[in-house]
Amino acid sequence: SFNRIKVLFGDLGGGSSDYIGEPVSISAHSLQAANLASKYFYSRNEPLDEEMVLASLLHDIGHMIGIEAGCKEEFQMENCGISNHEKIGAEFASKLGFSLRVADLIQNHVS
């Protein structure tokens, strides 16, 4: 599972410096989200919620999977990446054996 994620982040998430209109790659955006999640807990002197940080890191992996699959235009959100990327990402996380909570957090990050 680590190798699969590594391929997605390396080959697909890092290639573009333009991510849905932002001057950052998908990988960099995902790392920023995980970093912010970590800082949230540390700033409150609370125990680190590793599942929350992991879900933050993987929250947009559905975009990378869609890109890898050669996603056709009808599946793309208007300049906002892959439609249903949150569902794609949650299913991916479940298939790799991540917890139900991680998959749920990925699934619901858009709502």
Image: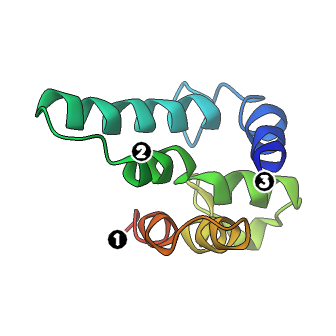
Residue that carries the numbered disc 3 in the rendered image = 1
In terms of secondary structure, where does tag 1 sit?
Answer: loop
In the image, residue 56 above or below residue 24: below
Amino acid type at circle 3 is Ser
In terms of secondary structure, where does tag 2 sit?
Answer: helix
Residue that carries the numbered disc 2 in the rendered image = 53
Find residue 48 and report its horizontal and vertical position in percent: 30, 40
> Which sits earlier in the primary sequence, circle 1 or circle 3?
3
Residue that carries the numbered disc 1 in the rendered image = 111
Nearer to me, 36 or 50: 50
- Residue 72 image label: none
Find residue 62 and report its horizontal and vertical position in percent: 66, 60
> Which sits earlier in the primary sequence, circle 3 or circle 2?
3
The furthest residue to the left: 44
The quadrant holding residue 101 is: bottom left
Taking the spot 84% from the left edge, 35% from the top edge, the residue there is: 11
> Which sits earlier in the primary sequence, circle 1 or circle 2?
2
Within-10-Å neighbours for mark 3: few <14, some 14–19, many 20+: few
Nearer to me, 103 or 69: 103
Determine whether label 3 and label 2 are within 8 Å by CB. no
In the image, residue 76 above or below residue 33: below
Taking the spot 41% from the left edge, 47% from the top edge, the residue there is: 50
The quadrant holding residue 21 is: top right
Marks 1 and 3, Cα distance to the nearest angstrom?
Answer: 27 Å
Q: Is residue 32 left or right of residue 41?
A: right
